[in-house]
Image (cartoon, rainbow, N blue to C red):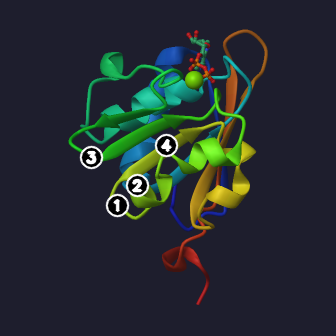
Amino acid sequence: MESSASRAVFRTASEEETIALGARLGRELQRGVVLLIGNLGAGKTTLAKGMVSGLGAAPPEDVSSPTFTLIHEYGGGRVYHIDLYRLDEPRQVETLGLDELFDRDALVLIEWGERFPQLLPDARTEIHIRALEDDTREIEVGQALSPANLPA
Ligand code: ADP
Ligand code: MG
C-alpha cells in the first residue's frame, strides 16, 4: 500500500492474517492517529495487535483490549491503544487528555473513537473492519489527512 493512496481494501481469512496485515499497516503508518472502526468482534483489537507488533513495540500476545483500562502504552510511548467503548460523554473523554497524546511522535490507535468526532484531529487514518461470512474480514484503510498527504 502506498501512503498516498486514498483508499485500500484488504481481505483476511483468519485472526493470524489480520495480525499480519496489521503489522504491515503499522510499519507503513509509523505514527499518527488511527481510528479502528467496526462492530464488537469485528477484529479491531486483533488488528491493533498486529500494528503494535509490526512496530516492534510489543509481541501480539502482549496486546490486550484496553476496554477497562481505556489506554494501553507500548514500546515506551511508541504506540498507544485506546478503547472509548465504556465512555458515553465527551466530557469523560476530555479527562483522558488525548490531545496531549495526539501531539506525540507516536502511533495512536483508537477503538470507538468515531463516537466523539469533535475530539479527534482532522489528520487521521480511518480503518473500517467488517465481518463477512465465517472468519473473513474486509479491512478498508482510508486516506490519512495530513499535510504530507495532501495534493500539492
Ligand atoms: P473487536 O476489538 O473489534 O471487538 P476483537 O479483535 O477483540 O474484536 O475480536 C475479533 C474476534 O474475531 C476474535 O475472537 C478473533 O479470533 C475472531 N476472528 C475470526 N476471524 C478473524 C479475522 N479474519 N480477523 C480478525 N479476527 C478474526
Ligand atoms: Mg476491541
Instruction: Residue at the far top: name it.
Output: 134
Can you identify the residue that label 3 sits on? 77
Q: Are marks 3 and 1 in contact (CB under 8 Å)?
A: yes
| Residue type, label 3 | Gly
**Mark 1 near ligand 2 (CB under 8 Å)?**
no
Can you identify the residue that label 1 sits on? 104
Q: Distance between the residues labelled 2 and 1?
A: 5 Å
Going from the N terminus, do you reach mark 2 or mark 3 first? Answer: 3
* In the image: residue 97, left or right of residue 54: right
Q: Are marks 2 and 1 in contact (CB under 8 Å)?
A: yes
Give residue 50's position: percent from left, percent from top. Answer: 41, 30
Q: Which of marks 1 and 4 is in front?
A: 1
Res 139 visible? yes
| Residue type, label 2 | Leu
Q: Which residue is drawn at 74% across and 25% down?
A: 39
Label 2, residues with CA under 10 Å away: few <14, some 14-19, many ≥20: some
Going from the N terminus, do you reach mark 4 or mark 2 first? Answer: 2
Res 20 visible? no
Can you identify the residue that label 4 sits on? 109
* In the image: residue 104, left or right of residue 145: left
